[in-house]
Amino acid sequence: MSHSSKLYISIVLPGLILLMAGFFFFIALKTLFGRRPVVFSSRWLFGFVCLAFLPSILNSVFMGFSIKNASLITWINPVMFSVILVFMWIQMKGYLVFAISDTYFREALLTTIRSLGLTAEETMSCLKIKETGQEINVAIQGWIGTAQLKAAGRGSNELLGKIAAGMDGFFKTTPGKMNYMISWFYLVMGGFMVVLATALFFLMNKG
């Protein structure tokens, strides 16, 4: 094993895993101890998805440069994951809400819209603002306690930001029914990642 590959596996990879664990712990502990949902931009989640893919991409790149006359197959992996990340960047827009129940989310959303002096027409997966015609896509996974808000068009991005900020303020001041399924899941996943990173570090650095 080359020095660069060993350095990556023994130091860089455990560090990346710990960073991802930190993200999971942040969501879990903030919702469990804060006793309120967390609202933040989907771009933050995209950043940690990048961290999840980064080990595979970097490992393939290191292999490609360490092997003389590396074949095309060696470079397929990083190219494929890079294309996936570009696609996810396009898809992962808007805001995410964690540890939420269906009723609590709907109450916060509609209350915030009314506080902005607007009224909304509800459909299966979309809210249409009657005064402006702007649309906000809504996706709720109530069984696990997550929800997503996305602007249907670029013209709705500013409004979406105001709605997300208003909902965050609502959660701070108005208690409601929460769903901690995602919190406990992230807590367990974070623990597994810490164990994995620790084991990898000591395994590669023993002796």
Image (cartoon, grey):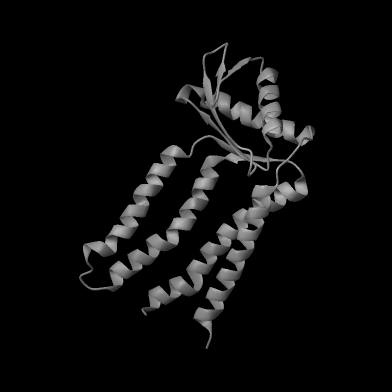
Circle count: 0
Q: Position of residue 3 (x, y in %)?
A: 39, 78
Q: Position of residue 186 (x, y in %)?
A: 63, 54
121 and 28: which is toward the camera: 121
Relative horizontal placement of residue 202, taking residue 59 as reference (left or right): right
The vertical placement of 152 against 16, above or below, is above
* Res 89 quadrant in image: top left
In the image, what residue occupies the spot 79% across and 33% down?
173
Q: Position of residue 183 (x, y in %)?
A: 67, 50
Q: Position of residue 154 (x, y in %)?
A: 46, 25
Relative horizontal placement of residue 95, taking residue 169 as reference (left or right): left
In the image, what residue occupies the spot 52% across and 21% down?
135
In the image, what residue occupies the spot 74% across and 41% down?
36
The vertical placement of 11 against 105, above or below, is below
In the image, what residue occupies the spot 49% across and 51% down?
49
* Res 77 quadrant in image: bottom left
